Image (spheres, coloured by chain):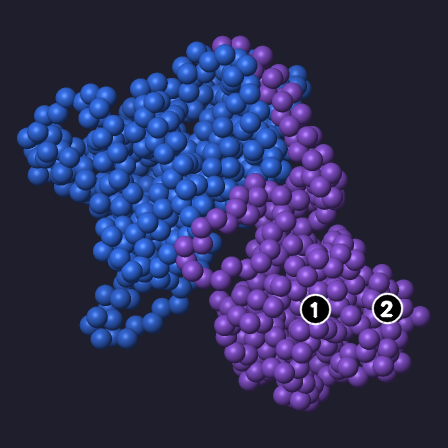
Chain colours: A purple, B blue
Amino acid sequence: MNLKQSLIIAVTLSVISIFAWEFYWRNQGKIPDLDDDKNLWAVQRARVEDASDKDVLLLGSSRVLFDIQLNEWEKETGVRPIQLACAGSSPLPVFHDIVNNTNFTGTVLVGVTNGLFFSTTFPEAGPWKRPQTRVDYFKDRTYAQRLNHWLSLPLQKNLVFVSTSEEAWSDDIDLKSLLNSVTTGNRSGKPEYPPFNAFAYIEEDRNNPMSEKTATDTAFANGIKAVWKMIMTGDGPPPDKEATTKFFVADAKKFMDRGGNLILLQCPSSGLLKEGEKKFMPRSEFWDPLVEATNAKAYNYEDYEQFQNFECPEWSHLSASDARFFTTELVKIMKADGALSNSKTK
Amino acid sequence: MLFNSLSFIVFLVIVLVLYYAKLFNWTNKKRMLLFASYVFYGLWNPPLVILLWISTMVDWVAGKNLAIEKNQRKRKLWLLLSMFVNLGFLAFFKYRDFMLDNFTAVVNTYGYGYQTQPMDIILPMGISFYTFQTMSYTIDMYLRRTERARTFLDFALYVTFFPQLVAGPIVRAGELISQFYEEKRATINQFVWGLFLLTIGLFQKVVLADTLLSDTADTVFGSKSILHGLDAWTGTLAFSGQIFFDFAGYSTCAIGIAMMLGIILPDNFRYPYAAIGFSDLWRRWHISLSTWLRDYLYIPLGGNKHGIVRMYAALMITMLLGGLWHGAAWTFVIWGALHGIYLVVERMLKTKIHIKIGPYNGIVLALLTYTLVNFTWVFFRAREFSTAKNMIASMLFLNGEGEKVLYSFDIIKVFIVITLLFICHWMMRNTSMKAVSEKTSPWVLGVFWAIMVFLIAISQGSGEQFIYFQF
C-alpha cells in the first residue's frame, strides 16, 4: 500500500473535479450568493441588542424583504434599517420577541401580508414555526455556529458550488437538492408543487433585491406564479383573525406604551394574487380593523397614487427597480407625516 | 464543535500545526491538546466545561486515594464518591425530568393530582460518554486492574481528549493514558491513513447519513398517519443506515484524527449489520459501550458464572440499562429489552440447536439478524409508543390500506444504499479496512478517496448534529 501516492491522486482528482463542478454551474448561469438562513438572520437580530431609539427594524414576510430596499431607506433617512422580515412567515413571533426580550424603543415597521399575518398563532404551524425557529436559534446559537457562519461567508460569496439554502429551493445544487429534483413515482397521490426556484439575491445585511432574471424572464416568473396559484387553490386552514389580532395588539400596546414607534405597512401585489387577496381577505375585514385596534401609524399602498401601477413580475413582490422607487416614495410619505419621528432625518 | 464543520477544519489545522511545530516539548504539547479540547467543548457551551473539570478533579482525587489507600472500606468510599458524582451528573442532567414524570405518574395513580414543572435543563453534550469513561478509571483502580495516571495532565487529557470526548469511543484508562507518557508523532503513513479515515467518517456522516437517508427516515417517523408497509420498512431501513453511518462515521473520524496525532484509539464498529446473531452483533456494534457494560455491569451482576437464570437476569438488566443509557424515555428501555430478549432467546436456542455456519446459511442468518434489529430501531427512533406500534403493525403488513408518504425514487434510493451497506458489511465481515486497502492499488484507493471528497464537497453538511451527541 502506497498511501502517499493515493493521497496525491486523491488531492489532484478532488481539486480537478470540484473546479469542474464549479465551472459547470457557472456556465449554467449560477452566480455565488448568500443563503438567507437562520445565521444571517441571527446576526441582524443581534444588532437589535445595541440599537438606539433612532434605529428602524423591518419585520414582516417576504414582501417587506423584497420591497423595502435598505440603500434607498438609508439615503432618505440616514439610518440603515435592520432587516428582520422572514419569507413565508407571520411577523408576530419576531415582534413578540422584540417587544418582550429587548428594550428597543425605536421604530418597528411591520409588513402586513394578510394571508400570513392573520394565518395562525399555533406554534407548530409553518408561518409561526419558521420565524420562531430563527428567534430560538438567535438565543441558543453556539460560539461554534457563529464561527462556522463567519467562516462560511467568504466561501458563499465566491463559490457557486457551496450555495445551498435553508429554504431548499428547487434549483439548489447541493447533492440532496439534486437528488430531490428526481420526483419519479408520486405514490401518495397528493398534488405536487411545481418547481419553486430562488428569485432574489440576498446581501450580508439581508438587503434583498429581486433577481434580474425574475423581472425580465417571463417564463421564469411564471414558474413562481404557478407556486402561488397552487398555494391559493390549496386546502390550507382558514385565517385566525381574532387570535392573531388579539396577540399582535397586546404586543403593539406594550411596545407603544414604552415609547416605541410602530408602523404598519401593506405592500403591493398584482394579478391573480391581488384578486384573491381582495376577494378572500378584504381590506375592510382585515387591514382596517387591525389598524383601528392597534392605533398605530399605517400605510397601505392602495392609498397612494404613485403606487397604483406596480406590476409585480411574479404577482407578489416588486422588481428591484420598483422596490427602490417604492422605498424612496414610502419614506418620503412617512417623513412628511412625521411617522419616522424616532429616526434622525436629513 | 462538529467534525463536519468549517470551524473544526480550522481548529484541526491549528492543533496539528502546533502539535508538529517544534515550539513545545511533550508536556507543553499535552497542555496544548488539553486546552484545545476545552476549546473544542467550550465553543458549544462554555459553562458546561465546569462539569468536565469537576468530573476530572473528583476522579483524579478518587484514583489517587484508591492507589494509596489500604483500608478496603475507605477504598469503597472513594469509589462510591466517584460513582455518586458521575452518576449524579447523569441523573440530574439526563434523567431528572424522566424520573420526575414517572414519579408524578405513579403518585397521581393514587389520586394526589401532583403537578411538576419540567426544568428543561440543557443536556451537556456527550455527558454519557465522558462520565462512563472516567468511571471506568476509578472502577479499574478500585479493582486494581489499572495503574494510577502518572500526572494530573495525563489524566485530564484522558478525560477530555477532543477526538473522542463527545461521542466516543469510550476508551479505558489502560488503552489511552499510557499513550500520553511518551511523545507521540504519527508516521507519514499513520498520518495519511488518519486523514483517509477522517474522510471516510465524514463521507458516512455527510453523504450517506444526512444526504441520502435522513430525510426518508424523518418523513416516515414524523408522519402522523398509519403507513403502508413498504413506507414503514423503507423508513426503518433508512434509519438503520442513518444511525450506523452517523455513529460509525463519528467514531471513524475520531480514530482518524487521533491517529493523525499518533494516538491509537480502539475500533468501535466492525461491520455490525453482517452479524450472525445478537451476541455477534454486540461484538460489532458500539464495541466500546458493549464491552463497558459487559465489564462493569454484566459481569458484576454475575455474568455466566452463577447459573442460567442469573445469567439471563444479568443479560436483561444490562440491556435494559443499556437502553436507558441511550435516552431518558421508555422507548429506549423497550429497545434495550428487545435486545435483551433476543440475546436470551439466542442463548437458549444455542443450547438446543447446533448450526454450522457456512457462507450460504451465514448470509441468511445475517439477514435474519438484521431484520430483527430493524424492529428494535423502530422503538429507538419513534418518539412515542403509538408511532412505534403503528410502525410495527405496518412492517408486519397489517395495515394494508396504510398511507403512502414516500416517492418511488426515495424507496429505490434507500433500498440501493441499504443493499450496498449489507453487502459491504458481509464482504468485510472477517477482515478490516486496513487489510483491504493494503491489497488495493494506490490508484484505485486514490480515486475512491477523491470521489468521497467530491461528494462531501457538493453535499455540504446540512446535519448540525450527530445523533449520538444527545446520549
Q: Is residue B57 left or right of residue A99?
A: left
What amino acid type should be assigned to the residue bearing mark 2?
A: Phe
Residue B172 at x, y = what percent?
37, 28
- Image position of B399 with respect to B345: above or below: below
Quarter where residue B175 is shown: top left
- Image position of A153 with respect to A210: above or below: above
Residue B369 at x, y = what percent?
24, 35
Specify the subunit that label 2 lies on.
Answer: A
Query: Which mark is in front, 1 or 2?
Result: 1
Residue A141 at x, y = what percent?
59, 52
Mark 1, other Cα within 10 Å: few <14 / some 14–19 / many ≥20 = many
- Image position of B259 with respect to A218: above or below: above
Secondary structure state at the residue bearing disc 2:
helix
B234 or B178, which lies in front? B234
Quarter where residue B428 is shown: top left
Mark 2, other Cα within 10 Å: few <14 / some 14–19 / many ≥20 = some
Quarter where residue B364 is shown: top left
In the rendered view of the protein, which quadrant contains the C terminus of chain A?
A: bottom right
Q: Residue at x 23, y 65 (%)?
A: B106
Secondary structure state at the residue bearing disc 1:
loop
Q: Which residue is mark 1?
A: A316
Query: Residue A325 bears which disc, if any?
Result: 2
Tell me if label 1 and label 2 are in contact, CB under 8 Å: no
Co-location on one chain, circles 1 and 2: yes
Q: Say if residue A73 shows up in the picture.
A: no
Give how far apart the Cα atoms at labels 1 and 2 are: 16 Å
Specify the subunit that label 1 lies on.
Answer: A
Q: Is residue B8 left or right of residue B295?
A: right
Q: Is residue A178 left or right of residue B85?
A: right
Q: How many marks?
A: 2
Residue A116 at x, y = what percent?
61, 72
